[in-house]
Amino acid sequence: MEGAAPEGAAHRYTSEYAGRIETAWQDRWEAEGTFEAPNPVGELATDDPRHNAHGSKYFLMDMFPYPSGAGLHVGHPLGYIATDVVGRFRRMQGDNVLHALGYDAFGLPAEIYAVQTGRHPRETTLENIANMRRQLRRLGLAHDNRRSFATIDPEFMRWTQWIFLQIFNSWYDADQGKARPIAELIDELGTDDPAVIDQYRLAYISESPVNWCPGLGTVLANEEVTADNRSERGNFPVFKRNLRQWQMRITAYADRLIDDLERVDWPTPVKMMQRNWIGRSHGAQVRFESAAGPVEVFTTRPDTLFGATYMVLAPEHPLVDDLAAETWPDAVDERWTGGAPDPITAIAQYRRTAAAKTDVERQENKEKTGVFTGSFATNPVNGEAVPVFIADYVLMGYGTGAIMAVPGHDERDFEFATELSLRIVPVVQSPEDEVLPWTGDGVAINSDNTDTFGDEGVSLDGLGVDEAKSAIIAWLEQRGLGEGTTTYRLRDWLFSRQRYWGEPFPIVYDEDGRAIALPDSMLPVELPEVPDYSPKTFEPDDATSMPEPPLARVPEWVEVELDLGDGPKRYRRETNTMPNWAGSSWYELRYTDPTNTDVLTDPQNERYWLGPKAPGEAGGVDLYVGGVEHAVLHLLYARFWHKVLFDLGHISSEEPFQRLINQGYIQAYAFTDERGVYVPADEVEERDGQWFFEGRPVNREYGKMGKSLKNSVTPDDMYDAYGADTLRVYEMSMGPLEQSRPWDTRAVVGSQRFLQRVWRLVVDEESGEVVVDDSEPDTATLRALHRAIDGVTEDMGELRFNTAIAKLIELTNHLTKESVRSRSVIESLVLMLAPVAPHVAEELWSRLGHEHTLTYESWPVADPQYLVEDLVTCVVQIQGKVRGKVEVPADISDEDLTALALAEPNVARTIGDREVRKVIVRAPKLVSVVV
RNA sequence: GCCGGGAUGGCGGAAUGGUAGACGCGAUGGUCUCAAAAACCAUUGUCCGCAAGGGCGUGCGGGUUCGAGUCCCGCUCUCGGCACCA
């Protein structure tokens, strides 16, 4: 953009000049360890007083990146710049700031690349990390590099595996509401029989329906499967299969995971998503007697029990076979039979068609279908015999897999009842103009069984929904017919994957196939070399295929002889690996004590950086910035592990992330030609609102930045064209952090012009001499300065970098216009500029004669005397419309101001001969006249 | 369908219920220059008007208020999440 500097301006702040300054300061920061944050104890402790190691602290985190081979584009660093600005600001406010960046380095892309090239994923991953470190270093991030790590580092993996064993070796004590060591359960139960004990573990193996993805050759967690049953990564079909897999008992924490959302400062949408995902609903379990024994149902509307006119079981429900009658009752409605000669045939047929339906089909066609089992059950509140159906609108995986159907007050039951012509009884009074089904509030009707039960009975009639619920639950509990309960949508976390590039489990099996934890001394269990990195993958639609993990193909690793306490014996290693999410579920802890080899983090260090600041608080990272796409997955898993470690007494904080902000995305325009092919966005020209590529018109689209859309802009491009500081200022001034916005390379120059103006306030572009002097600034300048200090300080504190920068620009423009040279003013400006544009600020600070980095200089403080003006512009409104302005002293009285306002010529003219009915005075800024 | 965001100039965006459009980009005009670039200065919501000034204007329709982008009610569009969860 910028040509060679003209002869006469050798010290002009050009991109090239900026680049020299920036790399020089990056080298110096690194050499001096400028951003190293001391710990209270251990290897990273220090007595360097400038770091305030025992005073206030601030722990900042970014969602760490997966080191992709594609490198960064300008959208990636948005959050990193923002946290860096916060960190630099907090340091100048006196905080000890912990800010570092690790790498989430296990993952599918590296494995896929390895399969394609035969290169070890570690090799390529480490290369990618090195490249990313280079790109990010050039951005001037104030990270403590001693605290950086990658999840694949054996030292990190060791603790990931250690935490797994902690979870494996604990159980959830529902009475105490916390996890406890399994040894305490063994004592309490008086047995160490694995058949008993293993069922309680928080990490356990179960044979249960899991999401099998043949196209990826691995199973997936529920959270990794999209609504239309495809893999979030790769978009392959996913099938439910019964397989033996590791699970984590996250469901034990469902209540705390919901309730503790109130103790963190997170965006509402993220909290909502977590609440919905956990899906807690309060209701009742009620038993309906049948020929096959009691059938348990779950309902959130026990108040509508009197309106339950039939029951529905999921087709896979275990009692269905027992309920299937030999023959249809006389005069059975033919819509109930599915056209079959008897219930057993009807059920078999229905199950077959239901199973054959893909989930997509189920979704497209929500028409209710089902068949009658031929049996009846008894509604416990009124003794009525209600027919029992099976239907696929009832899911085995939720509640009890059986429902009582209340067609009068449930949409789905109503549809089914209409379809099969079932009885509909209203039991909640609906508003007059509403038709059934009525699902809203109302007074109970037709809900009285005192004529059957006499004094033992209950009447809900006249009660509101909530009262009726409590009344009927009390009645059911008293008679042993049911009880109030809570169910959750959340399922346990499927924790094993059939991949190579993940953490191995620290588990071996003995000859009885029993899972045994390896002792801590044998950690980490490292990945063996394998002949082939890929799991066996299958045709994406091959639902019957079986998982085959790559590690199973290394018999010399799988078969081991170990001495686990009772002499050397043969064992077989677990061949699954942990999911991607393992490392990111606890990495916040490792930043606090990254070099500790004895514990995952020293309790003193953890307490200092993460502990609650006041009793009752949950603690956690002071600020965590990342994309909203992790709202459920990563953030839920990390909270879960954090709570387990808290329960077991390893850490003092109950939540990992106290405050969370979702940064927006930087998106970009992309252009397609008449064939629909993407053309390079940076070669498109705009004329009169139309876009042209090589003279031909093209269409504009808006979307993610990326190679495929040919609209990527890389940080490296920006470093070359403008320098890192300009890129930082531009990204921060584009808008609020949380908001997504379009990239506009043309607009970047505005940020460069701003930095150039600041530069010229200090340095003569031709001679390179410092031009500041010690002159006393005039009052107008002092006002501008202190107003800026006041506003910038507040904006920075609230992460409003865009408006903070606007205020710095205003101050700079004032100083430029008035040719202000006063050192005191310019130094304050340089200090305030430092968080967003640290290199140029350091350079100017140094040229102003300061020996040390400005990193730990005190942030300027506004002098209140310059924040009040003596003369202010008062606005005069008539009927709320501005009709005039008067310059008045700030301390003017209401009476004087009113007089002045009414005397203002235009005001007087507008009022004319109308009567002034009321005057509202907000001295000294506003007078509002009502006529 | 349910839940949660959002809508302001040509563009990105500012505005404790009190002068809508800060700051930046772009555009137009000017200074400097042989010329250009850069820099600097000025103008820039829209309509009427020579001007003074006035009308209109924050997705749409109502309301509260002396005064509403901001608060309340009802919609539209849009983005995100969930989706037969009993």
Image: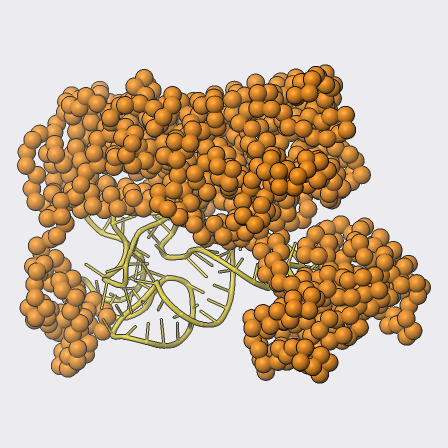
Left or right, residue A908 beside residue A272: left
Instruction: Identify which residue is drawn at 19% across, 21% down.
Output: A851
Instruction: Determine the image quadrant of residue A409.
Output: bottom right
Q: How many marks?
A: 0
Instruction: Identify which residue is drawn at 16% across, 34% down.
Output: A826
Chain B representation colour: yellow
Image location (x, y in percent) of residue A931: 19, 79
Left or right, residue A35 beside residue A251: left
Work out whether A338 lies above or below A333.
above
Work out whether A425 lies above or below A277.
below
Image location (x, y in percent) of residue A852: 21, 23
Image location (x, y in percent) of residue A925: 16, 62
Left or right, residue A577 beside residue A270: right
Residue A885 visible here: no
Instruction: Determine the image quadrant of residue A78.
Output: top left
Instruction: Determine the image quadrant of residue A750.
Output: top left
Residue A527 visible here: yes
Work out whether A34 lies above or below A260.
above
Image location (x, y in percent) of residue A382: 73, 76
Instruction: Identify which residue is drawn at 65% across, 66% down.
Output: A477
- Indicate the quadrant containing the N terminus of chain A: top left, top right, bottom left or bottom right: top left
Left or right, residue A672 beside residue A844: right
Chain A representation colour: orange
